[in-house]
Image: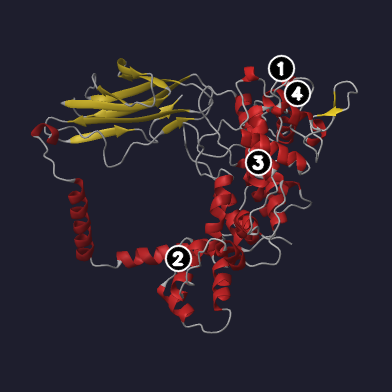
């Protein structure tokens, strides 16, 4: 049964196949030698697009190119093995402008070399080939890679370099499989292993390592669109790391590739599906999603499914189906009709692809990670606690010295600058306890929301400024008097806080909400007394919303 690690040498197969032919072959390849000529000069009128075909002749397939032309005239565009009996040959070699192909008015002209290629191809049987990506790769017959390379080098007068020494060999294979250099201990162990099969044992050890699983999984994660953010303009958080851990564990345990495929496409549909088999289907949940206000749910549901089509085709089939979403193409093996036939598999999904803030779109399941096990969490927590205890046990003078050294290094990296007297007396807008976002989630669709905070002052402050941002737009009112408004929640505003008084004060923020997400407010009111004392009112749990 094929397993995941067998994917690694797949990328070398084209090289091995080409090296298997040490001598130059006179046999022409349709895809390499003939298709480009026909595509550039003939397919405009005689290609796969049926609506553009002239004279009922299509040259894109063997069946249509060898069919009888006209009404029982016995002529064929191609007669395999006989160029002189082929109408195609007669037309491309004709000197009569009314017969010659391509016609002079088309501004296409075949060179002498191109004409001979077509003639030679016909004489060799006019064999067609399917799309290059569907061609079965043929392994070299019983030859190692060294003999294949040597066969090519012998014909050029070149010779291979000397074999790499053991240290270089270990560095290469370790970096190739893990992305990391070998440790000194690993190097010493390898150089000290003089038993037969030392290199093979190193490869086996590396393939069993978590680092190799991470290295091998990178291409798969990239192809599947893995990310822990949503991807659109509001690129906020979502949780896909449990699926990522499933992939890492699959590589680490060398899961058979057929299981690896089935579980990611339809793991939830397997009889008695386990939690991890359902987690595997996270492969289909990696597409970008959005919670931008004003988005059209059906539009993003379709966009979400289109991306699934593109992802599955690219990762599992090695095809780019994106072009066929809009049109047929002479270079593409997939038609527009076939694209939407494939799309229909995913169009049964109800996943919206939009509408959730800082999370995943539904439906959701609760699941754990095979890598991030409870035992590992406990072990990591114990290590962190031990480190904190070690730091707490350090003498205060030592901690202070380390802090001073760190501050000195950071200040040095920032460069020198002067602070003017006015800047030194600038009102600090944010206290040590930073303001936090507060949300009105009781009714996410509420168009109008009012946030309110009451507080007492012993005296009127000598200076007061208010910093605010509100989702989506707002007007700020202090003690019944408007001090300013904002219609762009992405650009915070600062206002002079007029109207404060000794005794009880009220700040009210009248918010206008747009979209399905709840209204939110972030605010800091900074005040300074005549004696220089400063105090703040910030958004926190003391605020009310209605």
Closer to the camera: disc 3 or disc 4?
3
Question: Which quadrant is home to the N terminus?
Answer: bottom right
Label 2: which residue? 382
**Circle 1 SS class:** loop
**Residue 256: % across, % down:** 70, 59
Closer to the camera: disc 3 or disc 2?
3
Q: Earlier in the sequence, mark 3 or mark 4?
A: 3
Using the image, tell me which numbered label, if any, was put on residue 50: 4
Q: Are marks 1 and 3 in contact (CB under 8 Å)?
A: no
Label 3: which residue? 33
241 and 456: which is toward the camera: 241
Q: Up-down: is 13 above or below 534?
A: below
Q: Tell me the CA gap for discs 1 and 3.
A: 27 Å
**Residue 176: % across, % down:** 50, 62
Q: Up-down: is 481 above or below 469?
A: above
Q: Is residue 424 left or right of residue 129?
A: left
Closer to the camera: disc 1 or disc 4?
1
> Can residue 19 be seen by looking at this rendering?
yes
Closer to the camera: disc 1 or disc 3?
1
Q: Is residue 540 left or right of residue 137?
A: left
Q: Earlier in the sequence, mark 3 or mark 2?
A: 3
Label 1: which residue? 98
Q: Tell me the CA gap for discs 3 and 4.
A: 24 Å
> Residue reaching furthest left?
421
């Amino acid at each position: 049964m094929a397993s995941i690690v067998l994917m690694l040498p797949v990328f070398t197969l084209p090289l091995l196949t080409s090296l298997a032919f040490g001598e130059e072959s006179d046999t022409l390849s349709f895809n390499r030698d003939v298709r480009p000529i026909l595509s550039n000069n003939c397919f405009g009128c005689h290609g796969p697009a049926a609506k553009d075909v002239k004279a009922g002749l299509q040259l894109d397939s063997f069946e249509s190119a060898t069919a009888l032309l006209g009404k029982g005239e016995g002529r064929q565009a191609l007669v395999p093995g006989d160029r002189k009996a082929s109408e195609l040959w007669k037309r491309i070699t004709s000197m009569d402008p009314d017969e010659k192909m391509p016609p002079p008015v088309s501004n296409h002209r075949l060179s002498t070399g191109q004409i001979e290629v077509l003639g030679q191809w016909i004489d060799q049987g006019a064999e067609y080939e399917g799309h290059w990506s569907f061609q079965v790769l043929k392994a070299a017959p019983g030859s190692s890679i060294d003999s294949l390379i040597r066969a090519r080098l012998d014909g050029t007068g070149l010779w291979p370099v000397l074999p790499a020494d053991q240290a270089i060999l270990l560095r290469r294979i370790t970096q190739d499989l893990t992305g990391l250099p070998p440790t000194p201990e690993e190097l010493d162990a390898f150089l000290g292993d003089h038993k037969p099969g030392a290199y093979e044992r190193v490869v086996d050890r590396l393939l069993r390592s978590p680092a190799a699983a991470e290295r091998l999984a990178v291409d798969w994660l990239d192809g599947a669109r893995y990310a822990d953010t949503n991807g659109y303009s509001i690129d906020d958080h979502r949780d896909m790391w449990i699926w990522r851990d499933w992939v890492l564990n699959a590589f680490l345990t060398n899961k058979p590739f057929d299981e690896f495929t089935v579980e990611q496409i339809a793991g939830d549909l397997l009889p008695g599906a386990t939690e991890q088999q359902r987690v595997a289907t996270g492969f289909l949940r990696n597409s970008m999603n959005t919670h931008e206000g004003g988005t059209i749910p059906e539009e993003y549901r379709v966009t979400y499914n289109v991306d699934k089509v593109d992802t599955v085709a690219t990762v599992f089939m090695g095809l780019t189906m994106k072009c066929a979403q809009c049109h047929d193409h002479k270079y593409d093996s997939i038609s527009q009709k076939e694209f939407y036939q494939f799309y229909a598999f995913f169009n049964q999904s109800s996943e919206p692809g939009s509408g959730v803030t800082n999370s995943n779109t539904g439906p959701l399941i609760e699941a754990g990670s095979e890598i991030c096990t409870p035992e590992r969490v406990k072990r990591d927590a114990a290590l962190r606690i031990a480190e904190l205890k070690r730091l707490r046990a350090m003498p205060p003078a030592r901690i202070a010295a380390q802090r001073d050294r760190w501050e000195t290094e950071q200040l040095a990296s920032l460069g020198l600058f002067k602070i003017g007297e006015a800047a030194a007396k600038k009102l600090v807008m944010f206290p040590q306890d930073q303001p936090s976002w507060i949300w009105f989630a009781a009714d996410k669709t509420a168009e109008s929301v009012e946030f309110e905070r009451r507080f007492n002052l012993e005296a009127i402050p000598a200076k007061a400024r208010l910093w605010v941002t509100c989702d989506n737009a707002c007007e700020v009112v202090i003690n019944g008097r408007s001090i300013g408004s904002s219609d762009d929640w992405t650009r915070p505003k600062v206002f002079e806080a007029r109207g404060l008084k000794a005794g009880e004060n009220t700040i009210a923020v009248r918010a206008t909400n747009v979209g399905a997400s709840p209204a939110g407010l972030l605010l800091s009111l900074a005040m300074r007394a005549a004696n220089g004392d400063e105090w703040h009112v910030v958004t926190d749990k003391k605020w009310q919303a209605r």
